[in-house]
Amino acid sequence: MAVETSSATPSPIKTVVVLVQENRSFDHMLGWFKTINPEIGGVTGSESNPISTSDPNSTQITFKDTAGYVDPDPDHSFQAIYEQVSGKTWDTNNPDPNPEIKMNGFVQNAERTTPGLSETVMNGFKPEAVPVFKQLVTEFAVCDRWFASLPASTQPNRLYVHSATSHGAMSNNTQQLIEGFPQKTIFESLEENGYSFGIYYQSFPSTLFYRKLRHLKYVDNFHQYDLSFKRHCKDGKLPNYVVIEPRYFDILTAAANDDHPSHDVSEGQKLVKEIYEALRSSPQWNEILFLVIYDEHGGFYDHVPTPTGVPSPDDIVGPEPYNFKFDRLGCRVPAIMVSPWIEPETVLHRPSGPDPTSEFEHSSIAATLKKIFNLKEFLTKRDAWAGSFDIVVNRSTPRTDCPEKLAEPVKMRDTDAKETAKLSDFQEELVQAAAALKGDPFNLVENMTVSSGLKYVEDAFKKFYDDGQKAKEINEVEDTVSADASTRRTTASKTFMQKVFSCLVCDR
């Protein structure tokens, strides 16, 4: 069932749950779902890319359906994505900010990175290989035109999820991590309008990239997923906006479940299954809309051209030499929507507005929350433009036939977790954010392994949380005080705890 128009009736949704996974394109994860529902804008098997875009006689690599465990991780930097979508290599000396979008450079870029890697990026999962997604797409809804907010890596795209801007970031920005990104988020907007939110983290919450979420008044909005999520579901105590952060670090005793290569996708399937089943059994089920998306495409092939001519959220231009104007979206990513208010086999294509050029992208989350909860204002020009996905609610009454349990995923990886591996770029960013909380040097990531990085971020967050709870007991501490060590100031006349938490966050 295709959905293109919106209803004027008030939304029955009182709780929106969002899980953002890592680094997979739509065609890679869900492209072959077209075989079970022709309405889905997936692949047919005729899609291909040349080994060389400059050679008209180049060998073509065809998109296959044999994806499984993926290692190594394809390139997904701004320069790599530029080549993947345009077929042209990025030239710092002669940049073309508005290349023609052909989606024909994935193989060329992959082969330059690692010979043979094109067989990985030109490959997708059969529906049977990701059984949890197969069941959810069949029972509920899929959006086949949800794009990353910009053609860049994880950090800036995740920033768009909750603030509809990356504040000019196109990649890892260590200085901004030290200070915390200053833009207003959907969390403050919800709070200002009397709504609640909760962040359920499993190792370290990437939402602490935002400066304002380091304020002590938000300490109680963070919940350890394993300890709290199922209990809050059972007790009917989920807040209006629920953010679930997966395990970003892969260790022997707790496999990563964020789907970032080289992590096992079956672990991500287990996480989605666990979340769904907890929501399904909750007394709040008939008021819930659950969204699963991915932050960016991770270098994997997608055939749909990336939209251009989109509005800059705040007119900030990216750094040299790119001077990116934030006027192009990234590649399509998977987007699955679950609610008893959704008819089976629903497919969302393009939104019907608010602008003729509007698309679904990460800023659609803020746009949808504004609409559902009647919030006072948009965050940026981007969420004012983005399509809202509340149109997926296409029933007048909630269903009673939604499955209570989902299929069991099958393990894909035959090897053990690589605890001694070097940190990925995103893991380094998480460590740097944790270092900001502790006031530690940021070059400590250089010698860290996955296991030591995980221990560091867990310890840092525990200290942040424990110190925050202690500080909240001190009457003199104001709500806007920050637990970010980079902004702390001390005076000799204060107690230790007052020294640690005595500074208001300045909006540098």
Image: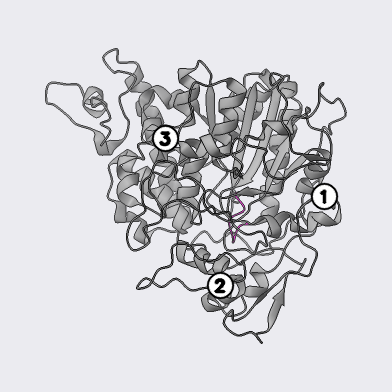
Question: Which structural element holds mark 1?
Answer: loop
What amino acid is labelled 2 in the image? Gly
Q: Locate residue 255, reporting x and y percent.
A: 61, 51
* Lower sequence index among marks 1 and 3: 1
SS category of the residue bearing label 3: helix
Residue 261, magenta (yes or no)? yes
- Return the residue found at the far bottom: 57
| Residue 153, x across and y down, in percent | 49, 56
Q: Main secondary structure of the magenta part?
A: loop
Mark 1 closeness class: few <14, some 14–19, many ≥20 residues within 10 Å: some
**Residue in the picture at 76% in, 57% down:** 42
The residue mark sitting in front, 1 or 3, is 1
Tag shown at residue 87: 2
Q: What residue is shown with label 3?
A: 462
Q: Quadrant of residue 124?
A: bottom right
Q: Nearer the viewer, residue 437 or 144?
A: 144
Q: Earlier in the sequence, mark 1 or mark 2?
A: 1
- Residue located at (69% from left, 21% from top): 11
On residue 273, the disc is none
Work out how far the residue at label 1 is from the one at label 3, CA to CA, in angstroms: 47 Å
**What's the amino acid at mark 3?**
Lys
Region in magenta: 258-263
Image quadrant in which you'd find residue 428: bottom left
Label 2: few (<14), some (14–19) or many (≥20) C-alpha neighbours in 10 Å = many
Few, some or many residues within 10 Å of mark 3 (<14, 14–19, 20+): few
